[in-house]
Structures are given as structure tokens and as C-alpha cells.
Image (cartoon, rainbow, N blue to C red):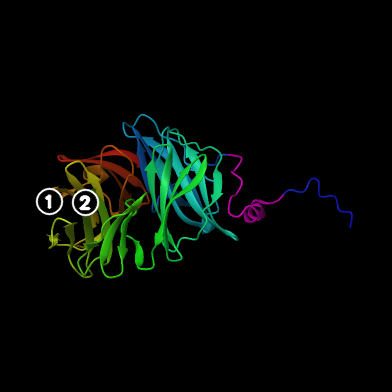
Amino acid sequence: DGADLTDTVLDDALAARLRGGIRPAPAVAEVVSIHVDDPAIAQFGAHLGVLWPNAEGGDEEVFRFTTRRVDGKAAGEATALPVDAGAVRARCVLPASTGFFVVFLVEKPGGTDLVVFPGATDGTVGPPRSIRLGYTPAVLPNFVADGDGFFIFGIGRGTLSVHRWTEAGLVERLRAPASTIRGFCDRQSPVVHSKGGTVMVVEPDGIGRALTAPPDFPGRRFAAAPVRDDCVVLAWVKAEEKGFRLLRLGQEREPLRVETGHHVGVLDVRPAEGGCWVAWTREPVADRDVSMAMAAFLSVDGTLSKPFPLLSGDDLDDVEDVCFASGEGAARLGCVTIDEALLVVELSTTGARVVARVGG
């Protein structure tokens, strides 16, 4: 007894547990190998913000945030974030009024906390703000940027909730029964799929009308994007089918079957002026072939442009994942290669060009 604990220092692992998943930031910057996997990407003007779990030594993962300019003039540091990767249940990066929000849902003994880091355009981050969410999400939630804050669309314990976060705190905007809702149809758009095959767009102040999806939706892979008040574009891949299906739900009854002649690995959609971009990976068709990133534009009248590859020449590589950047502006898509590098391409009606790289 009588032990003097005045100068006791907690090790990082114990400190992380006591703080419920928030670890002290490393005091000294380290040179690390970049291994991009399952990134979240946002765009703010000419800047891109990227968040991903980086594999670092053994089985350890560290969430890192970096920025790139689409004109190639500057690249931010790959900042390690003081968050316990094992406690993270959801995360994203969103455009803010002066940069980015780097957002995590962190599981703690007493519930789930929302942890938000302000991200600067040079890749640095400020001190995090943490607040109790008030429920435990049953499925991955949906985050949507909104000026100086953002919306969180979540489902937990039979309830659909919409909250708006700002530096002033977390405000509930909507609470509705959700016993029949299975989950969200997309990573960025708050479109939900319910039992009975109905699809609905959720807004901060209410739920849109129920639209009946085809019986084979959502299939093996799927995505969705509202393009107008009365129209939601659905994209999905059926098991063993070579290609995918598109439907302007609310405008058409029969889906467009896109015959690609190859199996589709992943796909994503993004609303755009005059229609919607669709991107996917084409699985290899021969031993010496590569998995390619492809895209096409679906216009408001239902016409699909000729698909085109997104990488070529020295940039051509096996692509394992594609994901659109959130935020206003040009349609930009992240392509994750088999070498764990991220190439961001900008799409236009004339093709695609690489505007940023992380790793590789």
C-alpha cells in the first residue's frame, strides 16, 4: 500500500481500451508502406480526401487519411488516425465547407460513438469530436454531406433514424418504424430496400413513396442512386450471369440487360447531370487477361452509352474494386488495383483520365 502512481504512464493499448477505442496519436511520423483497401473517397473543389485501413506489420491495421489535388500539384501526408481499427463499425470521408470530415462509428462498452475528425486539404487532421450516437446500427449506415455538417441515415432495433451532425452537436431529424427494412442499397445514397421488394428514398424530413423493384433485385452485387424525385436507378448482378441489369425504377417496368460477355466483380453508380454513371469491374476472360474497370453513361431517356475501359497504357492493371467519390463536381471514380494502389479517374463523355494516385 502507499504506492505512488504520480508518474505512471499507460501503454497505448491500455489507454485505447480505457478511452473506448480512441488511441493517442503517434508522436513521431513514420515512413510506412501504403496498402489501399476498401477506400472511402470525397472531393472538395480540386482536392480529393481518401480514407482507408492500411495494413501495417503483421495483422495490424491503421486507418490513414490523405489528400490529393486533381491537377497533381500537391499530395498530402498519409496521416495515421488515433482510432482503434478493431472497434470501428463504419467510416467515411465527406466534403465539408473548408475541407473534409473524417467520420467513424466506434463501438464502446456502453454503446456506439460518432467520432469526427476535421480533415484539412493538406492531409492533416485536427482533434476529434466524439458524441454518443444513441443507438447501435444493425446494418451499415449511410452518410451524406450537408455544408457545415452531414446527415447519418441509420437502422437499429426496428427504427429508421436520421440525424444531422455539426460542431454544435447531433440533432435527430427523423425517426420511423423500420421493421420491414432490410438495409441500404448504396454506400452513398440513402435508398432502402424492404421486405416485399419495395425501394424507397429516405430524406431528412421523411420517406419517399414505395417503388416495387424486380423480384431478382438485389442479386449478388447491387447499387442504387436517385436521379430524380420520381426515379431511382437500380444496378444489380445476378448470380452466374455475364453482365448486369439496370432499371430506372419509377420510369420503366422492365430492366435493361447489359450483356458484357464477362462476369462482373463489383459495380457502383453515381447521379450526374442528364443521367447516371455506372462503373464496374470486368473479370478476366483468359489466363493472361486482367480484371478491368469499365464505365458507361445512362441518360435520362434510358439510353446507355458504349462501355469504355477506365485504365490503359502504363496505368492498365488488375482492378479489384471501384467506388465513386462523394461530393459535388465531376464524376470521379477510385480504382483499387491488385497491387493495393488507388488510381482516381475522372469520367466524361469522351472517356476517362487518371487525376490522382495513392500508393503504388
Which residue: 52% across, 48% down? 115
Vertical position of residue 261 compared to residue 278: above or below:
below
Quarter of the rendering occupied by the N terminus: bottom right
Q: Is residue 106 left or right of residue 250?
A: right
| Lower sequence index among marks 1 and 2 | 2
Mark 1 near mark 2, Cβ–Cβ under 8 Å? yes
Residue 344 visible (yes or no): yes
For this orientation, the residue located farthest to the top is 73
Secondary structure at badge 1 equals loop
Q: Amino acid at mark 1?
A: Leu
- Report which residue position mark 2 lands on: 278
Q: Position of residue 88 (x, y in %)?
A: 50, 56
The residue closer to the viewer here, 166 or 79, is: 166
- Report which residue position mark 1 lands on: 304
Question: Is residue 19 covered in magenta?
Answer: yes
Q: Position of residue 89 (x, y in %)?
A: 48, 58
Magenta span of residues: 10-28
The residue closer to the viewer here, 54 or 7, is: 7
Secondary structure at badge 2 equals strand
Q: Position of residue 199 (x, y in %)?
A: 27, 61
The residue closer to the viewer here, 331 or 352, is: 331
Residue 60 visible (yes or no): no
Gap in angstroms between the C-alphas marked 1 and 2: 9 Å
Vertical position of residue 160 compared to residue 130: above or below:
below
Q: Main secondary structure of the magenta part?
A: loop
User: In the figure, residue 255 lies in which quadrant?
Assistant: bottom left
